[in-house]
Image: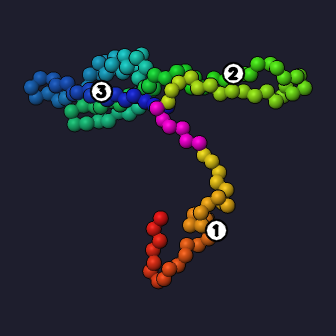
Amino acid sequence: MRWSYKTVHFELKKEGLLGAGFLDETEIEQELNDFGRSGWELISVLEVQDGIIAFFKQPVERPSSYHHWTEEPEEKSSENSFEEEKTEVSSFDSDEDIVHETAEDPEDLDEAEAIDEPPENHGIGAIKIE
């Protein structure tokens, strides 16, 4: 899942010329509720010298279901009904490449790539770079 992030800085309020700084709790509560209604989730709050920083996240808009399954048409006999196959249908285009893993047969590997064979020693201090 991908996330979108937002940071909000709540500054200290000053009271008079020499007054100490304070946080307006009512304002912060209202802001937090507004962000929550908009779909933002509060994940962290950090105290800084001039106030606090709130960190929010929300999921990036995507289809509610990435995959849905469709059954093949009923052309099979009732005896083989337990063997029904399902076909996966992708409901979105992904920017990421899909990598399919394949098992390699050790007999198909070159001699240099063979796992069971140690590298040839061509003398003391020799280095083989592949």
Q: Which residues are magenta?
A: 95-100
Q: Residue 104: tell me if it is visible.
A: yes
Q: Main secondary structure of the magenta part?
A: loop
Q: In the rendered view, would you say 109 is above or below 126?
A: above
Q: Position of residue 125 (x, y in %)?
A: 44, 80
Tell me which label, 1 or 2, sits earlier in the chain.
2
Q: Residue at x 69, y 27 (%)?
A: 87
- The mark found on residue 8 in the picture is 3
Q: Residue at x 50, y 37 (%)?
A: 97
Residue where numbered disc 2 is placed = 70
Tell me which label, 3 or 2, sits earlier in the chain.
3
Few, some or many residues within 10 Å of mark 1 (<14, 14–19, 20+): few
Say what secondary structure mark 2 lies in. Answer: strand
Q: Nearer the viewer, mark 1 or mark 3?
A: 1
Amino acid type for the residue under numbered disc 2: Thr
Amino acid type for the residue under numbered disc 1: Asp
Few, some or many residues within 10 Å of mark 3 (<14, 14–19, 20+): few
Q: Position of residue 109 (x, y in %)?
A: 61, 60
Nearer to the camera, 19 or 73: 73
